[in-house]
Each structure stands twice: as C-alpha cells, then as structure tokens.
Image (spheres, helix red, strand yellow):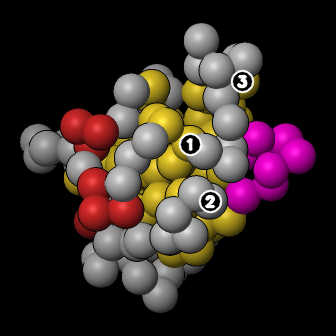
Amino acid sequence: QVQLVESGGGLVQAGGSLRLSCTASGSGFSFTRYAMAWFRQPPGKEREFVAAVSRRTGSTPIADSVKGRFTISWDSAKNTMTLQMNNLKPEDTAIYYCATAGGIIMSQLRNQLGYNYWGQGTQVTVSS
C-alpha cells in the first residue's frame, strides 16, 4: 500500500556532499500522519537511526553522529523526504534506507522496529 524509493547514493571523497531523496507513493501514505525516517547500515554493523520527521508529533530527531552535517527536509506536495549530507566522513559509508509508518509516537521515532515500510536502500560510500 506504501512504496518508498530512495535515490542519490554514490561514491564521494571525505568532505564531500551527497543528497539522498525518498519518495513515497500509494494510497496508504499520508505525510501529515506518517513519520518518515532515514536509517543506515554500515558494513558489518547493525542498522542505525539517522534522522526522522513527524509532522503529526512535530518532531525531527537526528542522530548525534550526523548532527550539524546532515539536514532533513521534505516536500509535502511531492511526498519526498531529502537528506542533505555535507562534510561526509568514511564512517558515513553505509546503505541508507528510507522508512515510514503511521501512528509512531514521538519517543519511538528512532526505533526501526516501529516502521512498517522500507525502501530498498541506496549505497553511500565515502573514501578517505
């Protein structure tokens, strides 16, 4: 009922920038009620929270590891969430996933278990 498509990944040198986009489609999606989030999975590690936006709760949490470098934004008319990544570091190398779900309370926005729909991911590789 909800489909998510990520784009914008690639290979970049440390200090460079990338912009990831996630577009949601399907009649089951409502940006006013659904939270959208970015998670990432570095090689050999578990998936971790990056950033999220919840219009319903008015919350936009972001992980400390990327705070000040990454910025989350959205275009409600296009159902598109964007992650602007600046000053990339090798430790940012990961598969980045877009996720969404409805009814997530504020305290659970960082919890991947609360998200019902996931994109297939886009690879970000940062070379040193």
Q: Is residue 98 visible?
A: no
The residue drawn where x is 42% and y is 71% is: 61
Q: Nearer the viewer, mark 2 or mark 3?
A: 2
Residue 103, image x, y percentages: 44, 41
Q: Circle 1 sits on which residue?
A: 34
Q: How far, Cα to Cα, is label 3 from label 1? A: 12 Å
Residue 8 lies left or right of residue 93; in this view the side is right
The answer for how far apart the CA atoms under marks 2 and 1 are is: 8 Å
Tell me how many marks there are. Answer: 3
What's the residue at 23%, 37% (across, down)?
A: 113
Is 54 on the left-hand or right-hand side of 66? Answer: right
Does residue 45 appear in this view?
yes
Give residue 40's position: percent from left, percent from top: 33, 48
At a point 45% along the width and 51% down the height, the residue shown is 38
Q: Nearer the viewer, mark 3 or mark 1?
A: 1
**Label drawn at residue 25:** 3
Please tell me in which quadrant of the rendered image residue 123 appears. Answer: top left
**Among all residues in the image, which is located at the extreme bottom?**
68
Check disc 3 and give the amino acid type: Ser
Give the residues drawn in magenta, as a range: 74-80
Q: In the image shown, does 95 or 71 lie closer to the viewer?
A: 71
Above or below: residue 15 compared with residue 105 = below
